[in-house]
Image (cartoon, coloured by chain):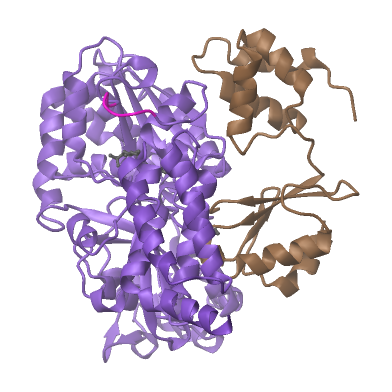
Chain colours: A brown, B purple
Amino acid sequence: MAVIKLSALDHIFEKYEEKKGNLIPVLHDIQEEIGYLPVEVQRYASKKLGVAMSKIYGVISFYSFFTTEPKGEHTIGVCMGTACYVKGAEDILNRLKEELEIETGQTTADNKFTMTVTRCLGTCSMAPVIMIDEQVHGNLTAAKIPEVINKY
Amino acid sequence: MAKKEILICAGTACLSAGAEEIKDRFEEEIKKLNLTEDYEIKTVISNTGCIGPCSLGPIAIIKDDSTFYGHLKTENVERIVREHLLQGKIVEDLLTEENGEKIEDFKEIRFMKKQKRIALRNTGIIDPNKIEEYIERDGYQALKSVLNNLTPLEVIEEIKNSGLRGRGGAGFPTGMKWSFAHQAEGEQKYIICNADEGDPGAFMDRSILEGDPHSIIEAMIIAGYAIGAEQGYVYVRAEYPLAVKNLKIAIRAAENNGYLGSNIYGSDFSFNLEVRVGAGAFVCGEETALIASIEGKRGQPSTKPPYPANSGLWGKPTVINNVETLANIVPIINQGSDWFSSIGTEKSKGTKVFAVAGDVKNTGLVEVPMGTTLREIIFDIAGGIAEDKGFKAAQIGGPSGGTIPKEYLDLQIDYESVKKVGAIVGSGGLVIMDEDNSMVDVARFFLEFTEDESCGKCTPCRVGTKRMLDILEKILEGKGRRQDLDKLEKLGNTIKETSLCGLGQTAPNPVLSTLKYFREEYETLIKQAEEVN
Ligand SMILES: Cc1cc2nc3c(=O)[nH]c(=O)nc-3n(C[C@H](O)[C@H](O)[C@H](O)COP(=O)(O)O)c2cc1C
Ligand code: FES
């Protein structure tokens, strides 16, 4: 794992210096930049923001969007919203688990994909859908899954 | 001269029906007849959906006179170009026929006719990243007239008179909410737009933010003026990156044009707006949890009272309104409260946007006057049940809502009537199910969602939903017992009565309402289980 240069994150703390309630926006920006929120980063944020470690950990563990584990190259989000569920999202999820040999929340051995389930992505008319990074793939069937992931 | 536009829907349904070929053919024919200077072909598709009448695809709309051609075939394109575009004659025999009548105007086809677009007036029509397009359609005029002609109390009166009620779920009168915050003591006040859109099958808020962000910005400035707030926040869920992006672009444009910032329109009123992104927690849609989240804390709800109108963000008086609620403000100011209150039913005024999903022919957003019946929404607008199967039930209001069976197809959808049959309008998620769906499984789906999203702060919700889910799963696995149904009901009612916030107070609804209307499905599963053992 690459060593994280903490001072490289200082611009984020500066950006939100004046803002009230800036913990969550800061965590968002850090995660966007380095992909996850490891303990040393949490400790650094605690010092920079003057917020207790316990509070930072409390926030990170509460919100499902934050992760303390590094993610694979691509993130697959399987929509488990109502429309997708009714149209067979579970079959899609099961097929993905089979193809990638991982459970939800895990990363493949080659570090290529991390699989998560998401709430409604707002593209219900194409249900069932999955989102790979920012790209939505719609009208899926379990049989189409290999073809979709082979593109990556 | 600007080119006239031909709109071709490029939604998934239309594409699979051959929209691409239709578009190519149009381009060819237009070139052949030297009309390229006059006409332009525009394919329409946004991230949130298509033009809508999927069952008529592929479709083309001649924007100039709003003529609608459905079920297009490539071999017919030539005639439309020659007769309609060149000679100005509508091609009668290619028009869509409904109830034995040829329909010319897009607004008159059944899909559109029963709709009334107020909150969705601009989405899909204007470019959200160009403030000029919003201004062209009377944008920021309501703000101007409010600042020049109305006192804050007069604005609140106007909203009260309109009868507008919150579209985020509870249906609380918006004018009244504003008035409480206006009266509350305090120098510093806040206005928050709730764009957390938690219902797992709803996407109207996303569609409005992505497609018409200025209408929300303008409404928030007006709300700020009315209650005396100079700072606003839009809380958007993390799953909506495009909404965040378009909103930020719009805020910058509004600042550059002087609609946000100090001394707006030369008045002494100043207002600023900031976007806050959620981090994936359903409960953060609940207003007290949302406030905690903006403050940088875990998004856990707190007991009310005090209500946010008196003590909200950082303890200051705060108004929280849903996106769709706010999308109605500008039209009310521009067209008057009398106009608005003439739409809808006695106690539910205006329109409601529904996200129609599931087993219907046209899925997507529809906006109808309050009081429209379920039958009109499903059969006239959504085109009926897919594959012409039978209708079984509609699930309305998402995880806090309930199921409406066939007997109530003619129910008028408004806050009161829906409540009477044991569901809620909620945020407007509407899932239509055909006869093949298992209602027990649908109930399990929603309960699993709330159980997973329970923030864990209060025991009835945390432990109770888990217990209910265990029982449901047991029944679905074929291990159910007769007494389980009573247990489910008892547990459900206890959770409703004793939970801290709306999440727990409504979580049992999908189970209780399917037990009420589809009890025999539960019983069948249990009977099968008993026979096996
Ligand atoms: C568990 C829970 C989730 C909620 N989620 C949302 C939501 O996603 N969006 C929303 O606008 N309101 C949501 N609400 C309702 C809000 O608490 C609040 O009533 C609403 O934002 C007020 O706005 P309105 O008066 O304009 O409807 C939720 C309520 C509960 C109890
Ligand atoms: S339910 Fe999957 S996109 Fe809406």
Residue shown at 42%/42% (left/top)? B460
- Left or right: residue B328 versus residue B359 is left
Q: Quadrant of residue B372?
A: bottom left
Predominant secondary structure, magenta span:
loop
Please provide the residue range marked out in magenta: B302-307
Task: Judge whether B505 appears above or below A86 on screen.
Answer: above
Residue at the farthest front position:
B533
- Left or right: residue B220 versus residue B208 is left
Residue B474: percent from left, percent from top: 55, 66
Q: Quadrant of residue A10?
A: top right
Task: Judge whether B471 appears above or below A36 on screen.
Answer: below
Residue shown at 52%/69% (left/top)? B475
* Quadrant placement of the C terminus of chain B: bottom right
Residue B114: percent from left, percent from top: 25, 69
* Quadrant placement of the N terminus of chain B: bottom left
Residue B196 is at least partly visible in this image: no
- Left or right: residue B188 versus residue B473 is left
